[in-house]
Image (cartoon, rainbow, N blue to C red):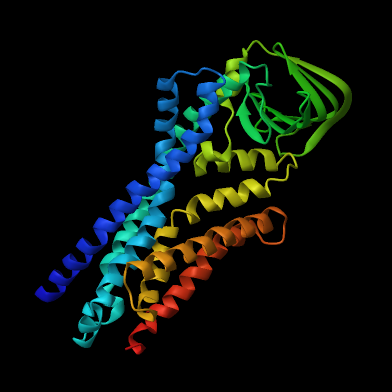
């Protein structure tokens, strides 16, 4: 067993250096892109550089998480490609070590990276994204742009939960849904309106319906209204402080919003797809290792081959993923299928290539 242990350490060492280099390099590149977008705040709104630096710090967890699957793919192809170009991989296989055994250390590292990515996406990234978006919302609100954003869930105080599908350029709200939690029963009162405005602590809704439910969840009272005013004592900061996109929620929080608004008849397919993708995207690290490792055997190896193949795989994966998401949102695929299809496609292909790898000599 000693040669196998030495072999594992050798492969891990060859994998680690390109992995860390890629994580650092791609993170810097992505942060540079964010910094370019934030230059308007510096030069147009005279935002302090220290605040922009704070915003970049809040974006750092998301950028690192995005680079981890890419870094696994690059490190897999570069490390194994180097062994292939120097004929070390051939010697290992001719010595009786199956290819699937050679790549076990890489697959274990990829699995650990997937777990770390998932935990970061659940515990760190949503919080950091929320802090970043709150700063952006405050800066935008100073220009008089509406404090309420579209396609965002938020808690509006006093037991109310809001969802606004669209905000027009004239600050008008369209397709508003409000849940008012009642202490007298398990189900909330549901208010839906086709339009409305929010101004000075007052929600003015137009052309809507109020529904109240009994203890079994059936509608026992329904009335229409032309105009409805809801006066709140909450200031504006509550609203942009509580607004959350799907990137600002973990899976548990997003699941709660999906269940809450699905009962009101809201189309939540896009949120269901995002819910499942919060699990599938972290799994991309392991999928890339499965798919990328056997591709080394089909070339002469080397850095140029590894980089070229990595770029192609990343391009295909990140083209197929949004296409599948769109198909899921529009009802062509079920949300679960839409989210997992890219991983299943690359994962199954990778497994087939691995189990047929030792036929290639």
Residue at horizontal 52 percent and vertical 68 percent from the top: 344
Residue ID at (41%, 50%): 67
Q: Quadrant of residue 105?
A: bottom left
Point 21% across, 86% down: residue? 96
Q: Is residue 157 visible?
A: no
Give the residue displayed 23% in from the left and 63% down from the top.
14
**Residue 295 point in image, percent of width and height:** 40, 75
Q: Nearer the viewer, residue 193 or 210?
A: 193
- In the rendered view, does 352 fall on the left or right side of 16? right
Relative to 36, say whether 26 is above or below: below
Give whichever of 305, 227 is nearer the camera.
305
Tell which of 192 and 319 is nearer to you.
Answer: 319
Q: Position of residue 299 (x, y in %)?
A: 38, 79
Residue that extends furthest to the left in the rendered view of this protein = 2
Which percent across, then down, holds residue 143? 64, 17
Give the left or right position of residue 223, taking residue 230 as reference. right
Q: Quadrant of the C terminus?
A: bottom left
Q: Nearer the viewer, residue 49 or 214?
A: 49
Is residue 350 among what the camera can see? yes
Q: Is residue 310 above or below residue 101?
A: above
């Amino acid at each position: 067993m000693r040669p196998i242990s030495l072999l594992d350490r050798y492969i891990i060492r060859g994998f680690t250096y390109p992995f860390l280099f890629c994580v650092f390099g791609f993170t810097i590149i992505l942060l540079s892109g964010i910094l370019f977008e934030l230059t308007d705040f510096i030069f147009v709104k005279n935002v302090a550089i220290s605040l922009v630096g704070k915003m970049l710090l809040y974006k750092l967890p998301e950028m690192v998480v995005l680079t981890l699957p890419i870094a696994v793919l690059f490190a897999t192809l570069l490390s194994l490609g180097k062994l292939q170009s120097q004929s070390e991989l051939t010697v290992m296989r001719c010595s009786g070590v199956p290819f699937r055994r050679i790549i076990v250390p890489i697959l274990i590292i990829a699995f650990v990276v997937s777990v770390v990515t998932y935990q970061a996406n659940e515990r760190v990234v949503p919080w950091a994204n929320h802090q970043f978006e709150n700063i952006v919302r405050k800066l935008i609100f100073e220009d008089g742009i509406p404090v309420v954003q579209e396609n965002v869930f938020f808690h509006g105080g006093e037991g109310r939960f809001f969802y606004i599908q669209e905000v027009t350029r004239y600050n008008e709200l369209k397709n508003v849904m409000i849940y008012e939690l009642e202490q007298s029963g398990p189900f909330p009162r549901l208010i839906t309106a086709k339009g409305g405005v929010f101004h000075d602590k007052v929600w003015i809704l137009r052309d809507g319906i109020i529904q109240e439910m009994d203890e079994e969840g059936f509608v026992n009272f329904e009335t229409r209204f032309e105009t409805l005013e809801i006066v709140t004592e909450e200031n504006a900061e509550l609203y942009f402080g509580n607004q959350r996109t799907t990137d600002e929620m973990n899976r548990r929080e997003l699941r709660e919003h999906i269940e809450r608004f699905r009962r009101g008849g809201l189309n939540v397919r896009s949120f269901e797809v995002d819910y499942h993708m919060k699990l599938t995207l972290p799994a991309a690290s392991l999928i890339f290792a499965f798919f990328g490792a056997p591709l080394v055997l089909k070339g002469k190896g080397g850095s140029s081959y590894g980089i070229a193949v990595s770029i192609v795989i990343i391009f295909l994966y990140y083209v197929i993923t949004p296409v599948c998401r769109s198909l899921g949102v529009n009802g062509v695929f079920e949300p679960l299928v839409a989210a997992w299809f890219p991983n299943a496609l690359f994962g199954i292909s990778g497994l087939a290539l691995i189990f047929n790898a030792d036929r290639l000599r």
